[in-house]
Image (tube, rainbow, N blue to C red):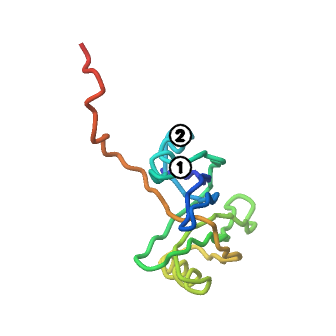
């Protein structure tokens, strides 16, 4: 199961006029721990940046992530499932959050409904909001390319 971390980085970059500009960017990172999420933040930073810092790392609870080829913006949707408690017979609501990339709110809503069309439990999308996320970084199980500095076990 994926553990998603909403991470913010801040750095200064020189613009065309030669003055330093502070830039803050947000990323969603799939990692096994806060430490790995922070390490991935440091890998994301451009080489010509100065005064770089990770300003926030928070766990983001997501039930699902829908990615499409087109769509520069990331939208977070609140989806409520309706189910019946077998013991009491009462209807209960289960709240889940999902993330989808799209060009606008309507397209995000359409993509969520399209992705959930085969879902058997009734649901309702109650909120769709634009997030500041620039990029989603999936977990990579590939070993590091440069392992030359690691001493072999004796």
Which x, y percent locates residue 68? 43, 75
Q: Residue at x 63, y 66 (%)?
A: 132
Whole-Å distance between the Cαs marked 1 and 2? Answer: 8 Å
Please state the total of marks drawn on the protein image: 2
With 81 as the anchor, is 73 left or right in this view?
A: left
Which x, y percent locates residue 43? 45, 47
Q: Quadrant of residue 104?
A: bottom right
Q: Is residue 95 above or below residue 109?
A: above
Which x, y percent locates residue 19? 61, 60
Frontmost residue, 7 versus 14? 14
Q: Quadrant of residue 142?
A: top left
- Label disc, if present, on residue 33 of the rendered structure: 2
Q: Residue at x 45, y 71 (%)?
A: 67
Q: Nearer the viewer, mark 1 or mark 2?
A: 2
- Label disc, if present, on residue 92 of the rendered structure: none
Q: Residue at x 59, y 59 (%)?
A: 26
Which x, y percent locates residue 88? 75, 60
Decide: marks 1, 2 in contact (CB < 8 A)?
Answer: yes
Frontmost residue, 86 versus 107? 107
For marks 1 and 2, the one nearer the N-term is 1
Q: Which residue is mark 1?
A: 3
Frontmost residue, 134 versus 138? 134
Callout 2: SS: loop
- The C terminus lies in which quarter of the figure? top left
**Disc 1 crowd, CA 10 A, few/some/many (<14, 14-19, 20+):** some
Callout 1: SS: loop
**Disc 2 crowd, CA 10 A, few/some/many (<14, 14-19, 20+):** few
Q: In the displayed image of the protein, which residue is found farthest to the top? A: 154
Residue 7 visible in the shown view: no
Q: Residue at x 64, y 68 (%)?
A: 131
């Amino acid at each position: 199961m994926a553990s998603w971390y909403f991470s913010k980085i801040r750095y200064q970059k020189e613009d065309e006029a030669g003055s330093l500009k502070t830039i803050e960017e947000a990323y969603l990172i799939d990692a096994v721990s806060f430490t790995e999420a922070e390490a991935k933040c440091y890998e994301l930073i451009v080489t010509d940046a100065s005064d770089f810092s990770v300003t926030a790392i928070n766990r983001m609870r997501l039930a699902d992530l829908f990615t499409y080829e087109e769509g520069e913006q990331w939208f977070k949707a609140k989806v409520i499932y309706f189910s019946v408690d077998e013991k009491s017979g009462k209807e209960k609501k289960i709240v889940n959050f999902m993330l989808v990339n799209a060009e606008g709110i309507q397209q995000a809503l359409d993509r969520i409904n399209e992705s959930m069309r085969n879902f058997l439990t009734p649901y309702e999308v109650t909120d769709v909001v634009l997030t500041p996320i620039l990029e989603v970084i999936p977990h990579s199980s590939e070993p590091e390319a440069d392992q030359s500095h690691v001493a072999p076990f004796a």
